Amino acid sequence: MIFGQILDPQSFTYTYVVAKRPGGEALLIDPVLENTKQYVSLIDQLDFKLVIAVDTHTHDDHITALGALRGLTNCATAMGEMTKADCVSVRFSDNDKLRIDDIHLQILYTPGHTEDSYSFLMADRVFTGDTLLIRDTGRTDFHNGDPAAQYDSLFGKLLKLPTETLVFPAHDYNGMTVSTIGEEMRYNPRLQVADKQAYIDLMHSHNEPYSRDLTASAKRSCGYKSAA
Amino acid sequence: MIFGQILDPQSFTYTYVVAKRPGGEALLIDPVLENTKQYVSLIDQLDFKLVIAVDTHTHDDHITALGALRGLTNCATAMGEMTKADCVSVRFSDNDKLRIDDIHLQILYTPGHTEDSYSFLMADRVFTGDTLLIRDTGRTDFHNGDPAAQYDSLFGKLLKLPTETLVFPAHDYNGMTVSTIGEEMRYNPRLQVADKQAYIDLMHSHNEPYSRDLTASAKRSCGYKSAA
């Protein structure tokens, strides 16, 4: 398997490229609009064919490149069935699989940061979006965020994966690139809670500033300008 | 092998942590002073014992954490024999090996960016410092930089490694985390030159601004404040 991790230096978003082999199919996870040319150039240089671009959830800190990539490469654009984005050609549900060549991504519905948050399990690693970050979890204080749902996603799903599973999140603001489920169980300060109510109380105690002012129409249209 | 890549979000330096197993020895490559606590905390959480901290070269854009790490952990601090830094407990030469548990780093002397630039070959990957960057090469216009020497380091050493060798540089300013020797041979614009003179001319055509004003004494003393 060929695996790449690309940082967007503005929003500290991680975009992932996955492929089986040169000449084969590729999948992009959480691409950022401003970096579209960089992805297309890299995929071309590595001799991949981009077949799917997928977002873990509707991002609030950057505009997705899904729309632009579909326009440039004719790839499928995939998000979960709970999304309100209108540019999506494939909508997946909990326990569905996305496939490129013989690589499978198992979909885990992991709401909490947003209602349309999903994680993707692929062999030895899981892409956790903003549900599970390295030593952190995604904010739940806007856009139908729900700390109770996030607790269930974390403790009921992600933390039940094997402890050695590699964790690749959608962001890191401290320069960390990877973690494991075991590390997060032991050392993530937000996961050291006695029960669901303690997690809800912890999340309600945070008041984070908004990061970027993105219009709802830009998010819904996957980066295309609204006609309105 | 356990392998970590940590970004310093100020200088876009990559620091690498390498270890064989929990409970075993660890090595840090190109640690940044401001992040010392982060490294020590991570190494503690992963149950490693830091035995060596090493710099690929004397950095001009950040202060190394070698001195601070030696003070906190009693680790060895290693740089090449060409360095002028005075806090170094191990000085290595071309073709030497650094060892932790049964992991070997073979030293390659790759001057050009600075006179004291070295690369480290470890199994399937090479740490290239500022000699070979992703789609770029390190500037050669200050601190005894020498484009002719860099040409020899690149074409005479690094590009002779197997094409599938993973390339982990000391920096990336575009969010890329890894490349391969084969990719760089084909797509690095600075390596598409006819001969050494063409490379020298190309490097002389660049005029880059200085990034940070670090005192020579801070660099020589590996981050400790000068007594003067």
Image: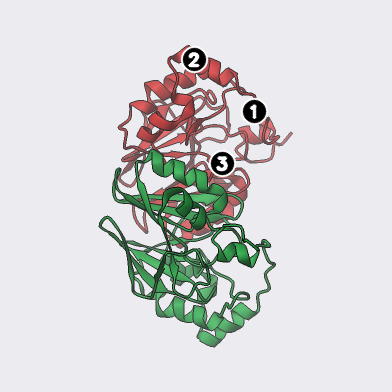
Chain colours: A green, B red
Q: Amino acid at mark 3?
A: Tyr
Where B199 sits versus A1, above or below? above
State the residue at coordinates (50%, 73%).
A116
What separation in Å lies between label 2 and label 3 (alpha carbons)?
25 Å
Residue drawn 55% across the image and 25% down it: B114
Q: Does dot 2 land on a helix, a strand or a loop? A: helix
Expressed as whole percent of the image width and height from the top left, the position of residue A227 reads 62, 61
Image point (59%, 18%), residue name: B204
Q: In the shown orientation, is residue B209 left or right of residue A22?
A: right
Q: Secondary structure at mark 1?
A: loop
Q: Earlier in the sequence, mark 2 or mark 1?
A: 2
Q: Secondary structure at mark 3?
A: loop
> Looking at the image, is A135 positioned above or below residue B112?
below
Q: Quarter-wise, where is residue A204 in the image? A: bottom right
Q: Which residue is denoted by mark 2 in the rendering?
A: B198
Most foreground residue, B100 or B55: B55
Q: Are marks 1 and 3 in contact (CB under 8 Å)?
A: no
* Mark 2 on the same chain as mark 1: yes
Rendering coords of residue B78 (x, y %): 48, 36
Total numbered labels placed on residues in the image:
3
Q: Residues within 10 Å of mark 2 (few under 14, many from 20)?
A: some
**Amino acid of disc 1:** Glu
Chain letter of disc 1? B
Is A108 rendered above or below residue B183? below
The picture places residue B176, in percent across and down from the top left corner, at 49, 44
In space, the residues marked 1 and 3 are separated at their CA atoms by 14 Å
Q: Position of residue A49 (x, y in %)?
A: 35, 47
Could you tell me which residue is drawn at 60 percent across and 55 percent down?
A11
> Mark 2: which amino acid?
Ala
Q: Which residue is mark 3?
A: B173
